[in-house]
Image: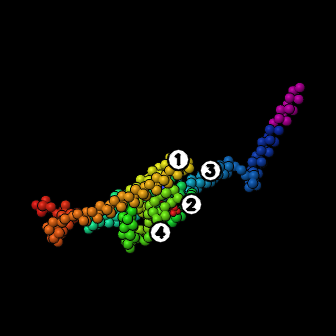
Amino acid sequence: MTDMGSILLFLGVVAALGLYFLMTILVTFVDHFPMPRAMNFTNDRLSRCHHSYTKNKNRTNRKRKDLQTMKTELEVNTLKSFQTELTRFFLAYKFALQEVETKINILQEEFKLIHEYNPIEHVSTRVKSPKSILTKMMKKELPPSIEAVRENIRDIAGARITCSFVEDIYKVSAMLQAQHDMEVVEVKDYIANPKENGYQSLHLIIKIPIFMSDHMEKVYTEIQIRTIAMDFWASLEHKIYYKYNKEVPEHIRHELKEAALQAAELDRKIERLNKEINILKENEAEPSLLDSTPIAHLAKYLTELPGNQIIDDTLFKK
Ligand code: 0O2
């Protein structure tokens, strides 16, 4: 038994020593002959791979972010330039109307002073609302571009002159048309040729130059000239059409046309009365000797000049 135990102990020691030598040889072998490249996935290499992957991912994210920022910037810039274009678009019509108003004011004042008569009762202006522009775009089947709108919708800037009598309409129209800085593109005479529904008015489509900081442009403007009666009818008819959403029953349409004819008849009657009264005035007026002298005329003229109000004593007191 003791022999057996000694033999086993001996064999265990030999096996342990053999294993030790084998391990030593193996370690030396690995140290001197490195593993093939593809198999050499050390921790270091793995961590380098991971690092590079993260770096690439970050770079891609940054690129994506940059692209997004660029896209947003581009969109913002496009919107900004569109906004500028739109502002310029509407401003042009506003300025055109200011030009037209100035022209009408000059005519009005000059008429009052020279002819002692004012043919213009009332002036109003408006720039067409975007909603109204869209409706007209759809009606005219225009492409959605500012250029198409600018060229085809010619009443975005609108001035309305209300005159006392029909003959005044033509006088005012002639005076405006004689102004060479504006181009008369079209004259629509709905007085000589009323619309089917009875609408009457004289429309001038003009192109008026306006001067901006960096360019000049000619802007379409519609000038509607009508009498008080025509305006009364048109304003109410416009309201009724909107109220009934353009689906006006036949009998209302018929009565509206009758009302338009009555308004025209009223204009004719008042105009005739005015002429009669003017003839009476001319015949009955007995100007005093003093009133008829040229000096009296000049004095009256000077006192009525608008500048007269500012040439007063107070200016000279200091
Ligand atoms: P709003 O709300 O006043 O702006 P065109 O431009 O030549 O292709 P359009 O627009 O019919 O065709 O030209 P027109 O005949 O010159 O009409 C322009 C404007 O005149 C209208 O603008 C109205 O203001 C007025 N108008 C024309 N016809 C009538 C009518 O029958 N009744 C009334 N009340 N007004 C009329 P909008 O854009 O239609 O309307």
Q: Are marks 3 and 1 in contact (CB under 8 Å)?
A: no
Q: Which residue is mark 3?
A: 54
Between disc 3 and disc 2, whose residue precedes?
3
Q: Viewed as shown, does residue 39 lie left or right of 109?
A: right
Between disc 2 and disc 4, whose residue precedes?
2
Quadrant of the image containing the C terminus = bottom left
Q: Which residue is mark 2?
A: 140
Amino acid identity at mark 4:
Glu
For the point 49% across and 52% down, which residue is it? 256
Residues shaded magenta: 1-14
Between disc 3 and disc 1, whose residue precedes?
3
For the point 61% across and 54% down, which residue is it? 60
Q: Is residue 10 magenta?
A: yes
For disc 3, the neighbor class at 10 Å (few under 14, some 14 to 19, many from 20) is few
Between disc 4 and disc 3, whose residue precedes?
3
**Ligand 1 within 8 angstroms of badge 2 C-beta:** yes
Amino acid identity at mark 2:
Lys
Q: Are marks 4 and 3 in contact (CB under 8 Å)?
A: no
Measure how far apart labels 3 and 1 are at the Cα level.
Answer: 68 Å
Q: Which residue is mark 4?
A: 186
Q: Quadrant of residue 98?
A: bottom left
Quadrant of the image containing the N terminus = top right
Measure how far apart labels 2 and 4 are at the Cα level.
Answer: 18 Å
Q: How many marks?
A: 4
Residue 277 rendering spot, x and y as whole percentages: 29, 61
Measure how far apart labels 4 and 1 are at the Cα level.
Answer: 31 Å
Q: Is residue 208 magenta?
A: no
Measure how far apart labels 3 and 2 are at the Cα level.
Answer: 58 Å
For disc 4, the neighbor class at 10 Å (few under 14, some 14 to 19, many from 20) is few
